[in-house]
Structures are given as C-alpha cells and as structure tokens.
Amino acid sequence: MRFSPKIVLTLYILEALYSSQNATIIHREGWKMLIGEVAGKTGFPAKTIRFYGQIGLAIPASRSNNGYRTYVDRDVHVLQFLHRAR
C-alpha cells in the first residue's frame, strides 16, 4: 500500500505527538501490531514468531517504549509467506 506524501507527513506528526504517551503507535508503513494480532493473522503461535525473529528467518520485531514487540504489515506478509511455504 502506498501513501500520498501528505498522509506520510501526517503519520510522522502523529507519531511524534503520541509516541511519548504510548497512546497510539503509528509507523510510516502503517499501524503497528502486537504479537497476538500478528499470530492471529499469520496462523503461527506467538512463540514461533519470536523464534523466527531470533534465528533471522523473519525480521526481528521492533520494540515500543514499554518493551512490547511491534510488527508492521510488511512483517505480517513475510510471516504469511513463510506459513504458506512451510
């Protein structure tokens, strides 16, 4: 999904406004998801997603200010591919 430059700028501004408060987590590539939501979308258990990140099979998750693993749409697509390839 491609965003117009105006939307990208708006997302950056919103990220700057809300990142210190942990109210809303926004990324330039879309909404960030926690591991439970990613597990539901990919069919992998959370433990498997963490393991794939550790061994480098998938991109390791970024961390939010409170230490939670966060994922973006690109990460979900990679994990869905791995699930189909399995």
Image (cartoon, rainbow, N blue to C red):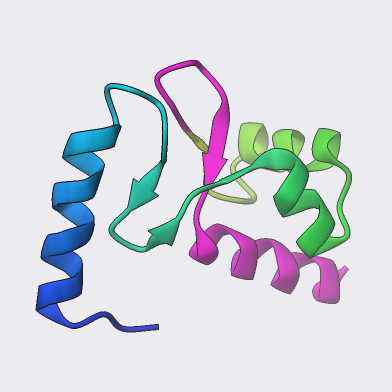
**Quadrant of residue 46 in the image?**
top right
Residue 63 at x, y percent in the picture? 46, 28
Whether residue 60 appears in this view of the structure is no
Where residue 11 appears, as percent x and y from the top left, is 23, 58
Judged left or right of residue 61, residue 8 is left
Give me the residue at 29% from left, 31% from top.
Answer: 19
**Residue nearer the viewer, 28 or 54:** 28
Q: Residue 9, relative to residue 48: is it above or below?
A: below
Relative placement, left or right, of 9 versus 73 is left
Looking at the rendered image, the quarter that the N terminus falls into is: bottom left
Q: Position of residue 75 (x, y in %)?
A: 56, 58
- Count the labels in the image: 0
Q: Position of residue 2 (x, y in %)?
A: 31, 83
Is 19 colored magenta in this rendering?
A: no
Left or right relative to 41: residue 44: right
Residue 39, placed above or below residue 3: above
Segment colored magenta: 63-86
Q: Is residue 26 visible?
A: yes
Please report the residue visible at 51 percent of the width from the left and 17 percent of the height from the top: 67
* Nearer the observer, 84 or 65: 65
Residue 3 in the image: above or below residue 86: below
Q: Quadrant of residue 86?
A: bottom right
User: Residue sitting at 18 percent across and 83 percent down?
Assistant: 4
Q: Nearer the viewer, residue 46 or 81?
A: 46
- Give the left or right position of residue 7, taking residue 85 as reference: left
Give the residue at x 79% y 62%. 42
Q: Does the magenta segment cover residue 64? A: yes
